[in-house]
Image (spheres, grey):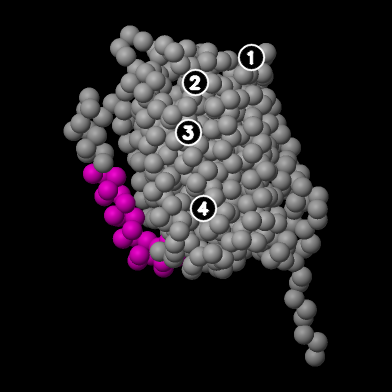
Amino acid sequence: MTLPVPARPARVTGAAVTALSLLAVSTGSLESVVSPTLPLLQRELDMTPAQGALLNIVLLITGALTAPIAGKLGDRYGGKRVLTRLMAVVSLGGLLSAVAPNLPVLLLGQVLQGVMVGALPLSFIVVRKHLPPGRAKAAIGLVSGMFVGGSVVGLLAAGPVAEQFSRHWMFAVPTCAVVLCTLAVYRLMPADAPGLAQDTCFDWAGLLLLSGFLALLMLVLALSPEAGSAPVLFGVLVLVLGALAAGWVAVERRASAPMIDLRMLARPVVWKSCVVTFVICLGTATGVYLVPQLLDVSGDGYGFGAGPTMIGFVLLPGALAATLAGPVAGVGERRFGPRAVVGTATVLMAVALLGLAALHGEMWQIVVGKTLISLANGLCVTALMTSIASSVDECDTGIATSLVLVTRVLGSAVGGMFGGALLTARTPAGSSVPAESAFVTGFLVAGVTAVLCLFVVRTLHKKGVTA
């Protein structure tokens, strides 16, 4: 009697990995177009600094909601299947952003675009199921680096396109690229088999509570600059936020198939990575928000009065550094371990932020500071992502990397809203120019936080975060 031979997984070609990498470039470009043009958008749409900060992070808000869901669904139903459907939503969001006549429509477009954050864990699922461990690590580092590298295209092109044509085209062009690359991935990438039993109950209660918690958290951050005008309402929202968090923990501990296994979150390999990622991304987002504002403003003895194109060129070296940081971090993590890479990144972040707090009167100082911030972010996030993706069971790849991505999003959201709150609070009545002390305080607080994070970094294992 001849036993059936198990079907061998389909071979992933170089063209398929290239298509996945180009999709990462396209989504990274679409994600980054707002940053260099934020002052222009604030003027055209008559936004306050707080509203500008909200626009700068609203894409990340959706990402925080989507990443764990996408990772869980990808582990369950297959990464490619969920990825292509996610990209359809991203394309719709890009189209809405392109045609948006006002701020509410643009915010809706950015909300839909935000599901692109869930694309990274889905990409990791696909390559890990089809490639041997060594090649899978290299592919994960490549896709992560290309996503960051896409910001180079967005930062460089957004300003000139917005100035020469209109703000609408800076969304339309990368959206077309996302559509074309998604079709290429659909055609070239083989389907991956589901990793979890599909007859288990889906944790809808956990999903709703987590979504409500993250959405309310972002609302609390958005309202924090005006908290003094309605302290009772703000206090009630904080209490509801705590109740949602407690309810979510209770539901996840009792669920047979939880959305996020809290035992995984309790593992040092995960929670230490999440703590460091949060701090690094908080510092990055503070710089990403404050630097363009500092370049745009013309204050009394500070600021540069730069336009979107000049802002894009000033941010470009940082985007290039972040692109190179991806593969460098992958090699460094394999050779020296994540502690060496993450420790170096954290020191760079602290030096850059504290340096900008003290020295920001010359253009070269802004360029050097922002470049170091971007380099530190790329090194840290890529090293931790690679370490986690290769440390957990294959069936948990999506949800484990999603936890780090959610932390990245939360850190970025807190950093962005912190910067917006500072500028709003320290803008004199009747003026549109914030005080210089707002920028100094923002850079200083984020830099000190990075220094304190070194106490967590030093507990990481030399050859990997202890599991």
Q: Toward the viewer: 460 or 123?
A: 460
Horizontal side of residue 8 vs 52, given as left or right: right
Residue, x 37% and y 30% (percent of image)? 441
Horizontal side of residue 176 vs 42, given as left or right: right
Q: Which residue matches tag 4?
A: 343
Q: Which residue matches tag 3?
A: 355
Q: Which residue matches tag 1?
A: 163
Lower sequence index among marks 3 and 1: 1
Q: Amino acid at mark 4?
A: Gly
Residue, x 40% and y 27% (percent of image)? 440
Most frequent secondary structure within the magenta stretch = helix
Lower sequence index among marks 4 and 2: 4
The answer to whether marks 4 and 1 mark residues whose Cβ atoms lie closer than 8 Å is: no
Q: Which residue matches tag 2?
A: 361
Instruction: Using the image, determine if residue 396 lies above or below residue 158.
Output: below
Mark 4: few, some, or many residues within 10 Å (few <14, many ≥20)? many
The answer to whether marks 2 and 1 mark residues whose Cβ atoms lie closer than 8 Å is: no
Q: Label 3's element?
A: helix
Distance from disc 2 to disc 3, alpha carbons, whole Å, reads 11 Å
Q: Which residues fall within the magenta stretch?
A: 239-265
Q: Position of residue 407 (x, y in %)?
A: 46, 48
Q: Label 2's element?
A: loop
Q: Amino acid at mark 1?
A: Glu
Q: Is residue 44 magenta?
A: no
Residue, x 51% and y 32% (percent of image)? 288
Lower sequence index among marks 4 and 3: 4
Camera-near label (2 vs 1) is 2
Q: Residue farthest to the bottom?
A: 1
